Image (spheres, grey):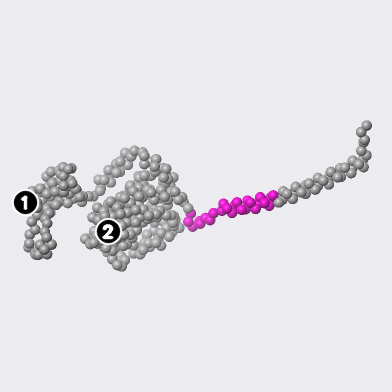
Amino acid sequence: MAEILSQEEINALLAAIAEEDDGDDEQEAGVSASGAVAASRASRSESKSRVKPYDFARPHKLSKEQLRTLQMMHEAFARGIASTLSAYLRSYVQAEVVSADAMTYEEFSRLLPNPGIIGVFSLPPLEGSAAIEIDPDLGFAVIDRLLGGPGVAPKQVRELTDLEQPVIKRVLEQIIEHLPDSWNQVMPTYPRFEHLEINPQFMHLVAPREMVVVIRLEVIMASASGRLSLCIPFDIIEPIVPMLSAHHLFIRGKKDASPAEAQALRDRLNRLKVPVTAVLGEAQVTVAELLDLEVGDYIALDSPVGGLIPILVGTRAKFYGRPGRSGNRLAVEIVETAHPEEDDDL
């Protein structure tokens, strides 16, 4: 028969079990506390690694990928203005996009020279105004070239004269006409030149702390080079931000042009101006003969009197005509069309 424990033995056994449980609880509490401390330290360390500085004065509204996309977009703009300036200045011109950066309007304003050459324009249907700034050395070189000089900037920067302002204004108007070459990849735009600004302190596109995107191009002429900058406020870009990705541009580039885009292209081509030249004739003389020329001397040209003369569109002969007068002006009458195979012979 099994031995039965007395009441005293039962009480002693319960007391021993209670003491053992208290020791285990204290040990578990110690382990749990140390684990909580370790976990807290790990959490703080992880939080520190995740914390990144944020400047509320310069919020990052565009990612690096979106800025790179803007830079790629304006490569077509650079090619367009290089082609236009080469024909307009009768000199080889190169242009390439250097960078696309986000900054505050105040920071951009501090970079502008005073006096400067700044054109303010808009990009309907997008709302707001943007600016195009041309380096004064480059701007004065362009003006000098258009006014018959070699294309050299003055040694000292000065304000534009009343004669020079409409000249450079026309150049800036022709430059911004190429913006749709880039912007139509995301949205059809119709740039409109608003006014020319000489003093950057009088130009207020947005508030000083507002963000803008500055796209810089390097323009190189035969006798001068300089910077050309586009300042586009973020308010203008905001509607197209979701489309600023290389993937979107690639997909859109493979689509056929819409009727509206095709019509916009035709409208821009119809407004494009090309030089038309009537060649009265040519002659070859020696240097000695050239030095002996005096007032009243005649130089015989190779074109027969009463014969047809070539009419060049750009650098190619497209028509033949006969010189004469239209009212009080010299003119040339188009008589026939040149054959395509004759282009290379002239």
Q: Picture coordinates of residue 327 (x, y %)?
A: 11, 52
Q: What kind of residue is marked 2?
A: Ala
Q: Quadrant of the N terminus?
A: top right
The residue tagged 2 is 222
Left or right of 299? Residue 135 is: right
Q: Nearer the viewer, mark 1 or mark 2?
A: 2
Q: Residue furthest top?
A: 1
The residue tagged 1 is 305
Secondary element at image label 1: loop
Residue 274 at least partly seen:
yes
Q: Picture coordinates of residue 294 (x, y %)?
A: 9, 64
Residue at point 32% right, 56% down?
Answer: 219
Residue at point 35% right, 51% down?
Answer: 122
The span shown in magenta is 35-59
Secondary element at image label 2: loop
Q: What kind of residue is marked 1?
A: Val
Query: Mark 2: few, some, or many residues within 10 Å (few <14, many ≥20)?
Result: few
Q: Picture coordinates of residue 227 (x, y %)?
A: 34, 58
